[in-house]
Amino acid sequence: MKRYDKLIFASNSDTAVAPMAEAIMQSKFLLEELEVTSKGMVVLFPEPINPKAEAVLVSNGLTLKDHMSEPLTREDFNDRTLVLTFSRETREKILKEFELPDGLPVYMLNEYVKDDREVTNPYGGTLADYGQCFSELEALIKKLVIQLNEEELLC
């Protein structure tokens, strides 16, 4: 039996880091089907992916050019949905703002895969900064895929 039905990468605006993580994750092989999406904490209206984030995705053979930011809502949380953030601040903000009960799967990506590396937010940075963020995400998501596949084998 599958552990999770859905994976949400949650960031502040859902215009750069989370959509890049979504695109990377969607390109990976999982033993069980998993809906993968990204959402933001502060989304007042739908916005497209940051052009630098999209350029980095395209240079790595991926794209989310049709992505539009979506807000994270209370309805997104349940025990079958894994929510991964990229910073402790975002994780704490989610737990506080949505007043979530203990035990719901909301983690920092690096915490979930037991890696000390944190993802650097490239906001306001150069194209190279977005490329560095992509590399950090890719390394952590490779670990995530292995972990999720192992968890599926053990269920």
Image (cartoon, rainbow, N blue to C red):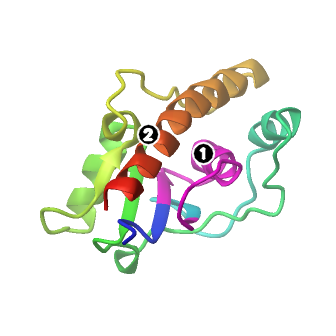
The x, y position of residue 135, in whole percent, is 64, 25
Q: Residue at x 71, y 61 (%)?
A: 47
Image-based side of 106 in relation to 146, left or right:
left
Image-based side of 24 in relation to 65, left or right:
left
Number of marks: 2
Q: Which residue is mark 1?
A: 21
**What is the residue that sits farthest to the front in this orientation?**
153
Say whether marks 2 and 1 touch (CB < 8 Å): yes
Q: Residue at x 57, y 55 (%)?
A: 30
Query: Is 126 in front, or is 21?
Result: 21
Q: Quadrant of the N terminus?
A: bottom left
Q: Secondary structure at mark 2?
A: loop
Q: Residue at x 57, y 68 (%)?
A: 33
Q: Sequence order check: which comes first, mark 2 or mark 1?
A: 1
Q: Write the start and end of the magenta stretch as one range.
A: 8-35
Q: Residue at x 79, y 33 (%)?
A: 56
